[in-house]
């Protein structure tokens, strides 16, 4: 048990870079104690130090692969030991998979389902008691515009993201009475600005839809453009997501300090 117990706490998956790192940085600046996870242990340790410098009173790094169904239980135990309850759960980690339905390798389908869908469900199962124990807890899920609008070549990825949108609706129906509410954020494809830590572009990975769609990763600034069938205007879900992260509405900040 630590000094940070009783303070606002959050758990962010995929917090070592990209959107997850940006959210973890925002939470750290608000003084939120954090549990963070990703596979790369060394980078996670660097990120932990960085988040403490930004203001997180305590950061618990837990390295592991979310394709492993045992990891959610480990994460739940480590977070409960450190902080007791959980004010904000950010289900951000996800893998991109680009292939036409006819050519989609079964192993890739399994991995996409495991990381993008099974892991969030298992994490919710493990963490709901901690969320219910917090004061008006919030779950933020990184979906994708591909889960709202079909895009050629993104069937498996888009299907997992559509399932996450549904999961969020069901979670709200089941848990709002217990003080737990959820929001899905559905971004379009975007480049990341790597804030604070490492200004070098992250190497583009073979399974990254950004690469398949001709996007280069990294570099300064944030650029975004629609892909496939996505419209060129902001989708309402995107607005809803941003509002839920940024607005306090006169009460306890979702995912942040009181
Ligand atoms: N960026 C976009 O344009 C965009 C658009 C729409 C939706 N999204 C969604 O937003 C979320 C974040 O995207 P991003 O672009 O910021 O991703 P990213 O830069 O590729 O970062 C992914 C994060 O998740 C971790 N991760 C990946 N696979 C993992 C696994 N099997 N187990 C545990 N951790 C894992 C990564 O660290 P390790 O590699 O060390 O594990 C990293 O911290 C994803 O769910 C993505 O689908 C992104």
Image (cartoon, rainbow, N blue to C red):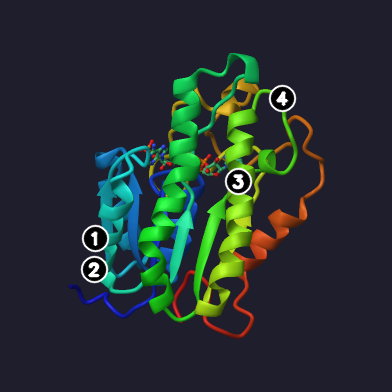
Q: Position of residue 202 (x, y in %)?
A: 44, 32
Q: Identify which residue is drawn at 38% across, 63% down.
A: 127
Q: Are marks 1 and 4 in contact (CB under 8 Å)?
A: no
User: What residue would you read off at disc 2?
Assistant: 82
Q: Which is more N-terminal, label 2 or label 4?
A: 2
Q: Residues within 10 Å of mark 2 (few under 14, many from 20)?
A: many
User: What secondary structure is found at the residue carrying circle 3?
Assistant: helix
Q: Quadrant of the N terminus?
A: bottom left
Mark in front: 4 vs 2: 4
Distance CA(mark 4)–CA(mark 2) = 44 Å
Mark in front: 1 vs 3: 3
Q: Are marks 1 and 3 in contact (CB under 8 Å)?
A: no
Q: Which is more N-terminal, label 2 or label 3?
A: 2
Q: Is residue 205 among what the camera can see?
A: no
Question: Residue 152 bears which disc, if any?
Answer: 4
Q: Identify which residue is drawn at 27% across, 67% down.
A: 80
Q: Position of residue 147 (x, y in %)?
A: 67, 42
Q: Which is more N-terminal, label 4 or label 3?
A: 4
Q: Are marks 3 and 2 in contact (CB under 8 Å)?
A: no
Q: Residue furthest top?
A: 103
Residue 230 or residue 113, whichever sits in front: 113
User: What secondary structure is found at the residue carrying circle 4?
Assistant: loop
Distance CA(mark 1)–CA(mark 2) = 6 Å
Distance CA(mark 3)–CA(mark 2) = 31 Å
Distance CA(mark 1)–CA(mark 3) = 27 Å
Q: Is residue 159 left or right of residue 15?
A: right
Q: Are marks 1 and 2 in contact (CB under 8 Å)?
A: yes
Residue 171 or residue 95, whichever sits in front: 171
Q: Which is more N-terminal, label 4 or label 1?
A: 1
User: What residue would you read off at disc 1?
Assistant: 78
Q: Identify which residue is drawn at 57% across, 40% down.
A: 160
User: What residue would you read off at disc 3?
Assistant: 163
């Amino acid at each position: 048990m630590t000094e940070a117990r009783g303070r606002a706490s959050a758990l962010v998956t995929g917090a070592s870079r990209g959107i997850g790192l940006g959210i973890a940085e925002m939470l750290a600046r608000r003084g939120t104690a954090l549990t963070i996870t990703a596979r790369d242990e060394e980078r996670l340790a660097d990120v932990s130090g960085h988040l403490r410098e930004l203001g997180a009173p305590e950061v618990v790094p837990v390295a592991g692969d979310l394709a492993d169904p045992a990891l959610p239980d480990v994460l739940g135990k480590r977070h409960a030991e450190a902080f007791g309850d959980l004010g904000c759960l950010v289900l951000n980690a996800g893998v991109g998979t680009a292939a036409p339905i006819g050519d989609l390798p079964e192993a890739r389908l399994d991995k996409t389902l495991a990381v993008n869908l099974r892991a969030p469900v298992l994490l919710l199962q493990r963490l709901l008691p901690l969320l219910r124990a917090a004061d008006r807890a919030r779950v933020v899920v990184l979906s994708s515009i591909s889960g709202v609008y079909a895009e050629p070549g993104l069937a498996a990825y888009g299907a997992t993201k559509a399932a996450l949108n549904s999961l969020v609706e069901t979670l709200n129906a089941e848990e709002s009475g217990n003080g737990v509410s959820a929001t899905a954020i559905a971004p379009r494809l975007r480049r990341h600005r790597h804030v604070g830590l490492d200004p070098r572009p992250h190497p583009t990975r073979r399974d990254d839809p950004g690469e398949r769609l001709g996007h280069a990763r990294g570099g300064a600034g944030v650029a975004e453009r629609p892909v496939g069938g996505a419209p060129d205007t902001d989708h309402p879900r995107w607005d809803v997501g941003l509002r839920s992260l940024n607005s306090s509405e006169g009460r306890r900040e979702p995912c942040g300090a009181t």
